[in-house]
Image: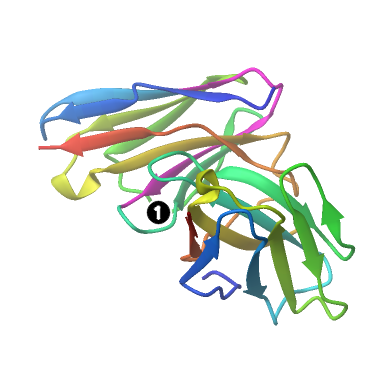
Amino acid sequence: DAKTTQPPSMDCAEGRAANLPCNHSTISGNEYVYWYRQIHSQGPQYIIHGLKNNETNEMASLIITEDRKSSTLILPHATLRDTAVYYCIVRPQIYGQNFVFGPGTRLSVLP
Amino acid sequence: DTEVTQTPKHLVMGMTNKKSLKCEQHMGHRAMYWYKQKAKKPPELMFVYSYEKLSINESVPSRFSPECPNSSLLNLHLHALQPEDSALYLCASSQNDYQETQYFGPGTRLLVL
């Protein structure tokens, strides 16, 4: 079973920041938080991941709370092409442990 | 380069047919994965190959037969499938299967008639 909970859907206005929350209250100390997205009928696309510290790359920022029980993915200036299902996944740093995808959040960026 | 390629893009097959899906990566990754995704559902793991050996089989029916001929290639052989096996089949790869980012291909959309 997925160890995360996400809202099933969110809307965001084009050009505004999209803030996607994820709850992982049972996360263990060795588990990373990964974010992927899947645009309709395409393969999932890696966005970002982190362990404790906040992370930023060219696509997004990941904010992890100090207790690590939740995180937020931030798309700073959402475009129509960011409309997708966003998956938050926690994965331990252990051989043989693989991604378990939950239902994700369907983000709709509106013009 | 983080490209994983999959062929064919689309496949229609009858229940008595034998077909194969192909996945290829040239990133030097040593772990490769097959996932199945039904419409409006998240991807579900089917198989994991680590260093060309099958390391995980998530109780997949024997009508799905994976093969890893070398470190760059992953095949999924299909035989006697059922209509409920119609889905998007996704391949992914990672540096190894120890806490590494997985990169996904575009998928093969399979329809079983």
Quarter of the rendering containing residue A76:
bottom right
Indicate whether B69 appears above or below A12: above
* Amino acid type indicated by mark 1: Ser
Q: Dot 1: few (<14), some (14–19), or many (≥20) neighbours within 10 Å? A: few
Foreground residue among A17 and A20: A17
Percent coordinates x, y for residue A1 in the rendering:
51, 70
Label 1, on which residue? Answer: B59
So how many labels did they put on this image?
A: 1
User: What's the residue at 28%, 27% (across, down)?
Assistant: B10
Q: Is residue A47 left or right of residue B5?
A: right
**Magenta extent:** B23-38
User: What's the residue at 11%, 35% (across, down)?
Assistant: B15
Foreground residue among B50 and B87: B87
Foreground residue among A47 and A110: A110
Indicate whether B24 appears above or below A75: above
Percent coordinates x, y for residue B40 in the rendering:
33, 57
For disc 1, the chain is: B
Residue B29 among those drawn in magenta: yes
Secondary structure of the magenta portion, mostly? strand
Quarter of the rendering containing residue A31:
bottom right
